[in-house]
Image (cartoon, rainbow, N blue to C red):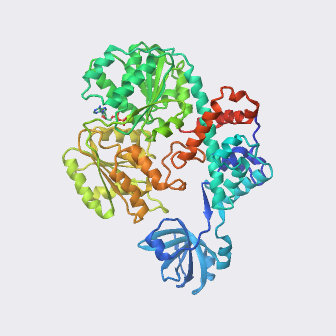
Amino acid sequence: MVIYMNITELKGIGEKTADLLNRLSVYTVEDLVGFYPRDYDVYEKPVFINDYIQEPERNITAIDGVVVKSVEMYNTGRLRVISTYIKDCEGGTCKCVWFNMPFLRNTLKIGARYVFRGHASIKKNQMVLEQPQLYTLAQYGKLMGEMQPVYPLTKGLSNKVVAKAVRQALEKYKTGLEKEYIPSEIREKYHLAEHNFALVQIHFPKSMEEYMEARKRLAFEEFFLFVLAVRSLKEKNVCQKNEYVIPDDKRTGEFILKLPYKLTDAQLRTWCEVKEDMSSKHMMSRLIQGDVGSGKTIIAVLALMNAAFSGNQGAMMVPTEVLAKQQHEAMTNMFAQFGVELKVELLVGSMTAVQKREACKRIADGQADIIVGTHALIQEKVEYKKLALVITDEQHRFGVNQRRTISEKGHNPHILVMSATPIPRTLAIIVYGDLDISIIDEMPSDRLPIKNCVVDESYRAKAYRFMENQIKEGRQVYVICPMVEESENIEAENVIDYTESMKKSMPDSIRIEYLHGKMKPSEKNRIMELFSAGSIDILVSTTVVEVGVNVPNATVMMVENAERFGLAQLHQLRGRVGRGGYQSYCIFSTASKSKKIKERLEILNKSNDGFKIAEEDLKLRGPGDFFGVRQSGEFDFGIGDIFADARVLKAAAASADIIMSDAQWSDRQENAVLKSKVDEYTLRCLNKLNI
Ligand code: ADP
Ligand code: MG
């Protein structure tokens, strides 16, 4: 039994700081040393102003410049602002702005030379530095090249406090420092640094090289423990006897024939695998992976039907209420139309207490054959009569833990999870180590490929006319903005203001509404339902529409500030159009002049294939590019990124294979530490991962 040390035991961490750290899920000193920097502040060589204007990539930038104007001072609201202009030796000029630092006025004399280091941006074609720190050339020269950890913080918590506490934990208490537990053959083979070295260096790297070594080791050990933990789970699954043998039912086969379309070969293959699993000797634990729009839902419906026809119940859990209602309605209608006599029940959080009670009663007494819902399926006090199959749709929104909770509601039901995350098969096999995998790698043949374009802001008027024409033909439109409302610090389109100005430049007859994550759930549902029903023409939204919503009548998607999203996310967003028989269009708009950003967006422009996009993105980012745009919230390992660190992941999986090829590995004395690490990992980390 491990005893953890509370963070308040560290000097300098009082109750207040502890509260702030708790908010970041740091409770113990052990958590703290595992709380890795999100970035490092590197005091880089000062850049030339004109170079920055050409390629405004970095945020924190240093300029070696001379003050060329006398300081201006004014107030805005409660802020005291001072500003001046500096010039570098190539002649470029840059505005510098400080808030609430009036005393700087005495330092900023015309002709004074400093290195100014602060948040850089371009405003009205001019470079601006905000809150720059001032260094003499000598001071800056000394700092150059050093790496300071930058921790993910929360309001009120300073980086200095965290860094000091981490140093104390490592130096005084040796927290996290332990006996090496990865066998030396493996360490040699993959050139892995020692654990203790890596843990110290990840917080306080002496150089980029040491940082890279530390990172590789820690990513490896994380993946290694993960794979061992997941494979151990799978071994348990494989041994589980099938307690609900679900045969294929004639009525399901007839239903397939009545569908208005023919299943693709990939769908048929997947359906066969699912059928076989459910009627085989062992329980099913299967993942269906297929790009957005590949038609995963129908496979789920068929599996649910077989489960219900065999006298059992099947449940499907989806990530949003809108989606739950949509699936419930679609299934109910289909069953009515094709004469399938099964009762589909809905269970979502926004139902009234009475509605919920009645639904739960029908679930408990077996009147409900198929149950569709959100987290309510596991949160509410639901008793199932005979739950034999659990499906989670868009599974990356549910963790291993939630999957397990809903499984425990039944007596070990069959598990089917569906994911639209396009990751290459070689990685999928590792990451979903506890599941068998079916891949739907074929789009329905009636689909017209989406037409894409990448444009700048000057194209907006033209895009609006295009939307008007589509709406005249009866179609609908999504516009995606990165922000909910206006922000002082970030220049990007926001849903609320955008909707206002869009209404002004469109005819009154066009119905425009907005949707974002901060709205009340009931309001969100209302808007989404209106859009589904065709009563809204243009939906201006944040990425909340990303997950699974099906409005086949929508044919245009315009993404504003497309550079602010990861490629995988943009691809998911794009999946909201092109879901019916109509030609669909996706317009990626960006104000950025950066070549790199254009290159990334070009990948989307050229391909509609999620798997290919993930791979291309990976190539473009390169294995060293850890601080680029994160793919999205899924596969949230502590330090490893399954895409950028794909090779490390594969090496870790191969190493785990070697260890596990010895059936008694976990009983051997030399593996005792490793075994306890795997157990700890299963307990502490596996449940937190979104996999
Ligand atoms: P996803 O894989 O993203 O969950 P869906 O299951 O929602 O995709 O399917 C998208 C749309 O394609 C739905 O409207 C569905 O009815 C339709 N569809 C599914 N399979 C086929 C098929 N074989 N041929 C034509 N349309 C299909
Ligand atoms: Mg879906």
Residue closer to the observer: 251 or 182 = 182
- Can you give x and y, in whole percent of width and height, for residue 179 in the image? 76, 42
Examine the rendering and report whether any part of residue 327 can be seen: yes
Q: Residue at x 22, y 48 (%)?
A: 471
Q: Quadrant of residue 683?
A: top right
- Can you give x and y, in whole percent of width and height, for residue 233 in the image? 59, 28
- Can you give x and y, in whole percent of width and height, for residue 9 in the image? 78, 47
- Please, which residue is most extreme toward the left here? 473
Q: Is residue 304 above or below residue 670?
A: above
Q: Is residue 151 above or below residue 246?
A: below
Q: Residue at x 35, y 43 (%)?
A: 575
Q: Is residue 167 above or below residue 408?
A: below
Viewed as shown, does residue 1 lie left or right of 542? right
Q: Quadrant of residue 681?
A: top right
Image quadrant containing the N terminus: top right
Q: Residue at x 56, y 19 (%)?
A: 240
